[in-house]
Image (spheres, rainbow, N blue to C red):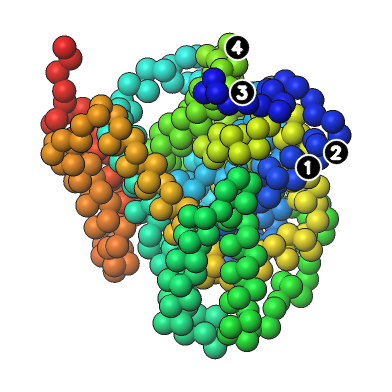
Amino acid sequence: MEHLKLKYGLDEMPPVLHLLAFSMQWLAITIPTIIIVGKVAAGIQPENYIDPTLYLQRIFFVVGVSLLLQTLFGHRMPLVIGPAAVLLIGIAASEGSGSSYSAILICGLILAILGITGLFAHLRKFFTPRVVATTLILIAFTLTPMILDLITSSVESVSPFNNLVFSLLFVLVIFIFNKFLTGIWKSTLILWSIILGSLAYYFIFGINFSWGGAETPKLAGFFHGLDFSVSVDPGVLISFLICFLALSVNDLGSIQSVGEMLKPDNMQKRITRGITLTGLLNVLAGMFGVIGMVNFSLSPGVIASTGVASRFTLIPTALSLLLLSFLPKTITFMGSIPSVVIGTTMIYIMCSQIGAGLIIAFNSNGVFKFENGIVMGLPLMLSIVISFLPQEVLNTFPLSLRPVLGNGFVIGIIAVLIMEHVIYREKKV
């Protein structure tokens, strides 16, 4: 993108006031995803496993550390990092058990080893455009049951029907604003959607705002009760290995997208360091018992709209996230978002995910053939069928295989790899 005019380049330090202003913009973009994915992940935990506020505190801490390390020592580019939505699928399939976070730790270590040894490059050949496109769409499809539960869960006197109507109208409003907003306003649309959507929900249905539980956790309470023991469940581990394949492709794509935009030196080393550090940061997330991390792909849009590519603007953002992790009352306040607003916002995010998948599918070789539709169609259909299986049917599956056979995303990924590389394998010219 040679035509892109930057106010501040990759390694340029803006004046203090500009630095803080642009850092606050990154913070406004980062926080909503932490709250949305974090609240959903906290809700999957077994009863009384961990206080939701403590869970969010831990995520804020891990994201702050991750952002600081990636900016200074990893890929060293202006890239937002945060909780990976794809790992929600694995956590849900294992019902939030402790083995989920042991699996995240182990898979993070494997990813770091693949990155630092260069073996990750050999895995990339399996992720053709059709596989990547299907993977992106699968994430949205297999999260649908979870989103449906968030939207239809009744709160106080609000019926599931009223929640559904509110959600449908709310998501239309979000897309209307998405159509007409530009620049940083569009980049922070999710933040404004959460704030205004929550206020509208409380006002329309006359619900009293609740600050949170009667007992607020202590400032550094999230350090207490950390359990560093590793519990390995083979079925859960296989499920997360598949999820981490998708996470690594997403991470690679995000790093490459900013690299293509800014054309920094030593790009291959940046990719290696970035992927390796993402693996190690997932080890950290597993140790803290929270959902793993991934670099987000929204950074190029923010850089283009602000004209600021300085990686140093993310350092105050990281420090702010670390500070917030020690403020439980603030975290509790942020976590008071109604579940229907969380679910509706996730619909918007997943629509963007589907859009990205379709762009890759249709632009990969200029022609979208019937065969492409077949290769992508079967995995998508299988994932939907598995994702919406009644609980009584899932209970008949062998317990050790349930995290794999009962996980629509895992079945979809296996199916698309078989379709792409075995049944419809293209002959090399």
Count residues near mark 1 (Cα–Cα under 10 Å), then give few for <14, some for 14-19, many for 20+.
Answer: few
Instruction: Report how far apart the C-alphas of labels 2 and 3 lie in the structure.
Output: 25 Å
> Which is more N-terminal, label 3 or label 2?
2
The quadrant holding residue 295 is top right
Q: Is residue 133 left or right of residue 244?
A: left
Residue located farthest toward the right when viewing the structure as drawn: 16
Asked if the residues shown at circle 2 and circle 3 are in contact, with their CB atoms under 8 angstroms apart, the answer is no
> Which is more N-terminal, label 1 or label 3?
1
Total numbered badges shown on the rendered structure: 4
Asked if the residues shown at circle 1 and circle 2 are in contact, with their CB atoms under 8 angstroms apart, the answer is yes
Badge 1 amino acid: Ala
State the residue at coordinates (52%, 85%). 158
User: Of helix, strand and loop, which one carries label 4?
Assistant: loop
User: Of helix, strand and loop, which one carries label 1?
Assistant: helix
> Which is more N-terminal, label 4 or label 1?
1
**Which residue has dot 1 on it?**
21
State the residue at coordinates (25%, 49%). 380
Residue 282 position in % (x across, y down): 58, 36
- Closer to the eye: label 4 or 3: 4
User: Of helix, strand and loop, which one carries label 2?
Assistant: helix
**Which residue has dot 4 on it?**
265
Residue 113 position in % (x across, y down): 51, 21
Badge 3 amino acid: His
